[in-house]
Amino acid sequence: MGRLSRDASRRAADPHRQRPPPVSYPSVQRGRGPLRGHRRGAHLGTPPPAPAAADLTSCPLACEHPLPQQCSPLARKSVMQKNAGTQAFDDELRKLLASRHAIIYVQTYEEERLERALDSLAARAFSQPIPFVTWSVTEGLCFADEEPLPNTNEPLAALDAVLTHPKTALFFFRDLHRHYEDPQVVRRLRDVYRALRRSYKALFLSGPELRIPRELEKEVIVIDLPMPTMEELDEVFQEVAGGMKGLAVELGEHYDKLLRGSLGLTEDEARGAFTKLLVGKRSVGPSIIDRLYEEKRQIVRKEGILDFIPPRISLDDIGGLENLKDWLRQRLGFFTREAKDFGLEPPKGLLVTGISGCGKSMAVQAISSYWQMPLIRLDMNRIYAALAGTPERTLERAIQIAEAIAPCVLWIDEIETALVGTDGEGASLATRIFSSFLTWMQEKQQMVFVAATANEIDQLPPELLRKGRFDQIFFVDLPTQSERYDILAVHLAKHNVPNPDDFDLLSISKSTTNFNGAELAELVKTAMYLAFDQGRAVTNKDLYRAMSQIVPLATTMSERIKEIKRWADTRAIKAND
């Protein structure tokens, strides 16, 4: 019972959590007989009488506001934490308790962290500490560090105990959703709701997926436990590092970067990552951050909703697109305190449209490197695959992770594929997802810079394009002659081709009028294959031979490209010179 001993140690250090000595508990039969318990003077017994009128107007919570004469139950409400901090979560719970919300579902993977938060809430939210009672099918009802109450492993018996408990208390039931197929459990939950809404008792349920019986959808309140903050991650790192004797942590000013790079991980994921990075080391320095990013990439990938993309492409790796680069350079300082004091708001996002193969995806990846922000990629197909239960919940989970990692760049590649080409029920679902996403983009408070790319730009809905969603819309056209020169030079250098000055890139760039960036990259690669096959260095002749083997997309789809250009003439800013 390690959890109970940890609870006991916390209470020993906190005078608010001291209780009278424990008492013994008689056996309990499901739905029959008295059930008595004790924690801070609390008792389980016969059902209490209806509360007096005065009880409905005085709030036992440690707050100053009065309550209305009668709190009517609210319908199911989904709360997306805008300011994902522990204090905001605690404040939200206090409000729900003060307004007599009887059953609260907390959506989270972090059961133990939630339990600690509720335990603390029971100790401090009220004018005096109240019982915090946990239940699981393996332990039954547990009051603090006492032995579990006998015969309460079955959910009906445990819910009966909640009904007969006469004092204010918080109850936390683990994995109750596993028993929803039993109609008696669902009925008893509805009984609990009707009884608890007239008191300040509350029943908490939790799980990574939203699972609520249909009969209770209008009664249960749903909130999210925010991801750990930098302060909480700092405590985890200090705990892990402090447990390794002789370890010297030499991070200095890079320590904040380490913590910021850990945002978006659960407490246990962060603890595991820190332990793996520190174990067996005598000292660690700034290089640990790169290894943390790799660990984080694997952890985020495991959930299957987002991809964590390590920084590999810089602005120097991109030939051309000078207008886009200038825009990014001008906004580099927007994330500083000086910019905030000046009255500037950080940029919200960027839509990069244009012809396929011209460097849109590379440009997005370069934003992350240039601004030194984590890059996470959202594949809208995974949203519709409902990897977190439902498409709506999957989108909500993706946004929650992005906001926890903030400041970051959220990359949505080929955004139009998620919004077009559906009909019937698929169209209705796409509309709901699209509406939720637009609302978040408009109202988001966290520094999540949305960088979206699109090929079929004329199919994008107008709601996505209006100001307030994206700060700017850039159109990436086929590269100009000077840009083709730069792109060829970049790829020759990338492949370590010797003597790059010996190539007549001016002539080759003039001869590749309709080539896009991807085709120029392929041209260099093909020339290298030709030279390698003959056992010699690459020459100008190889580049020209490779050129003759490539039919540009602009030639095969000339009419479609003309349509795209006409659309962009009046709706977007050119990324090229």
Image (cartoon, grey):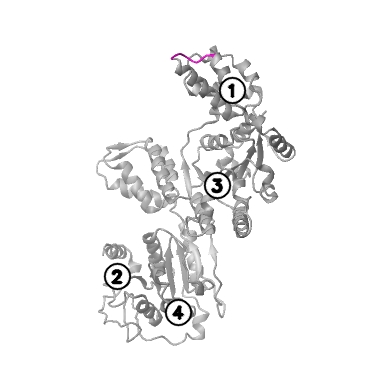
Gap in angstroms between the C-alphas marked 2 and 3: 43 Å
**What residue appears at the point 27 percent right and 37 percent down from the top-left corner?**
282
First along the sequence among labels 3 and 4: 4
Q: Which residues are magenta?
A: 535-539
In the displayed structure, 371 sits above or below 468; it is above
Where in the figure is residue 285, as x and y percent of width and height?
A: 35, 36
Residue 406 drawn at (x, y percent): 51, 47
The disc labelled 1 sits on which kind of residue? Asp
Q: Which mark is residue 413?
A: none
**In what element is the residue under mark 2?**
loop
What amino acid is found at the position of numbered circle 4 in the picture? Answer: Arg
- Residue at 67% x, 42% y is 457
* Number of residue marks: 4
Where is residue 70, by image quadrant?
Answer: bottom right
Q: Nearer the viewer, mark 2 or mark 3?
A: 2
Of the two numbered discs 2 and 4 in the rendering, the one whose residue sits closer to the viewer: 4
Instruction: Looking at the picture, tell me which residue is in the foreground, 532 or 239.
Output: 532
Please state the horizontal and vertical placement of residue 481, each as a whole percent of the image: 65, 22
**SS label for mark 4:** helix
User: For the residue marked with disc 2, what is the amino acid?
Assistant: Glu
Q: Which residue is mark 1?
A: 486
Q: Which circle marks residue 187 in the picture? A: 4
Left or right: residue 560 versus residue 3 is right
